[in-house]
Amino acid sequence: MKQKAYLLVLILAVLLLFSTFQALGMTHNRPIKKGILLVAFGSSIPEAQISFQNIDKKVKAAFPGTPVRWGYTSHIIRKILAKKGQHLDSVEMALARMMDEGFTHVAVQSLHTISGMEFHDLQINAHAFGRMAGGFDHISVGYPLLATEDDFRRVTEVILRHIPEERKKDEAVVLMGHGTTHPSNAFYAALMYHLQRKDANIFVGTVEGAPEIDEIKEMLLEKKIKKAYLMPFMSVAGVHAREDLAGEDEGSWKSILTKEGIGCVPILKGTAEYDDMVDIWVDHLKEEMALFE
C-alpha cells in the first residue's frame, strides 16, 4: 500500500515538473514585447493634469515605440473621477491588461516623491505579477524621485533653478510635501538640509508628517522673515496645493503665515511641470529598461 502511495506521489511530481518545464519553455519562446507602466497617486483637479501630460510626453520621447500605460494608486481619486465619467486603471488592473495583451517585459516607474508605503506596496504587487505562471518574463520597478544621494543633489539643483527670480535672499521659500507615517518621511528633513546648505531661507514642511507648518512658522519667525514664496513639493498642484497650501481657510499654510505678519506668494506648479525634475524620474526608468537589454 505504501509503495503504491509513493509511486503515485512520484508520478505526480514528474508530471508537475514536466508541466513546469513546458510552461517555462512556452514563456521563453514568446517574442519579446516591452512596455512601460507609469504609476501615480492621481489627482481629481483638472488643472493638475498638465503634470501627467508632461511626464507622458517626456517618457514617450525617451522611449519611442514602447507602449506607455498608466496606473493610479488612489482608490478615492479613481472613484471620484469615475463618477465624472473618467475611468482610470489601478496598478493591478493595468498590469492585468498588459499581461492579457502579451507583454513580456514591463518596467513599472513610480512617480511618487519618496519611497513610502505606496511605493513599497507597488513593489510587492508588481513582483507578484512577475511570479504568475505564463505571465511576464521580466518586471522591474523604478525608484521614486528621491531615492539616492544623487537624487537629493539633482532635486536640490532643480528647486534652486525654479525659485522665482524676483525673490530676495532675505525672503523665504517654503516647500510643501505630502508627508507620511512611513520612516521615509525623514527624506523631507533631509532635503531641507541639502537645500539650506545652498540657501538658508528655504524650508520644507509636510501636510501629514514632519516638519509641520507650526515648526516651519517658528523657524520663519526666529529669522524675522516677512515674506515667503509657497511652492508645492508634489508632482501635481492638486487639492493639497490649492487648499492646504494656498487656500483661504484659516488652516491653510498661507493663512497661518499671513496671520503672523508674513506675506505669502503661492506658486501653484507641481514638480512634474518642470522638465528637469521629470528627467530624474525618466533616468530611473532608463535604468530599469536597461535591464531588458
Image (tube, grey):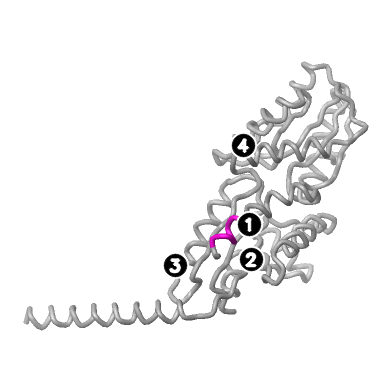
Q: CA distance from mark 4 to mark 1?
A: 21 Å
- Number of numbered labels in the structure image: 4
Residue 234 higher or lower than 192, as above or below: below
Q: Is the Cβ of the residue at disc 1 closer than 8 Å to that at disc 3? A: no
Structural crowding at the residue carrying mark 4, measured as other residues with C-alpha within 10 Å and reported as few (<14), some (14–19) or many (≥20) = some
Q: Amino acid at mark 3?
A: Arg
Q: Type of residue at label 2?
A: Ile
Q: Is residue 268 left or right of residue 6?
A: right
Q: Give me the C-alpha separation between circle 1 and circle 3.
A: 21 Å
Identify the residue position indicated by label 4 in the image. 187
Q: Position of residue 44 (x, y in %)?
A: 77, 58
Of callouts 2 and 3, which one flags the residue occurring earlier in the amino acid sequence?
2
Mark 4–mark 2 distance (CA, rounded to whole Å): 27 Å
**What's drawn in magenta, residue-wise?**
287-291
User: Which residue is identified by label 2?
Assistant: 36
The image shows residue 62, relative to residue 257, as above or below, that is below
Task: State if disc 2 and disc 4 touch (CB < 8 Å).
Answer: no
Q: Which residue is mark 1?
A: 285
Helix, strand or loop at disc 1?
helix
Label 4, label 3: how many angstroms apart (C-alpha)?
A: 31 Å
Which numbered disc covers residue 105?
Answer: none
Cα–Cα span, label 2 and label 3 = 18 Å
Is-magenta flag for residue 289?
yes
Q: Quadrant of the C terminus?
A: bottom right
Q: For the residues carrying marks 4 and 1, which lies nearer the camera in this image?
A: 1
In primary-sequence order, the first of circles 4 and 2 is 2
Secondary structure under tag 3 reads loop
Name the residue tied to disc 3. 131
Q: CA distance from mark 1 to mark 2?
A: 9 Å
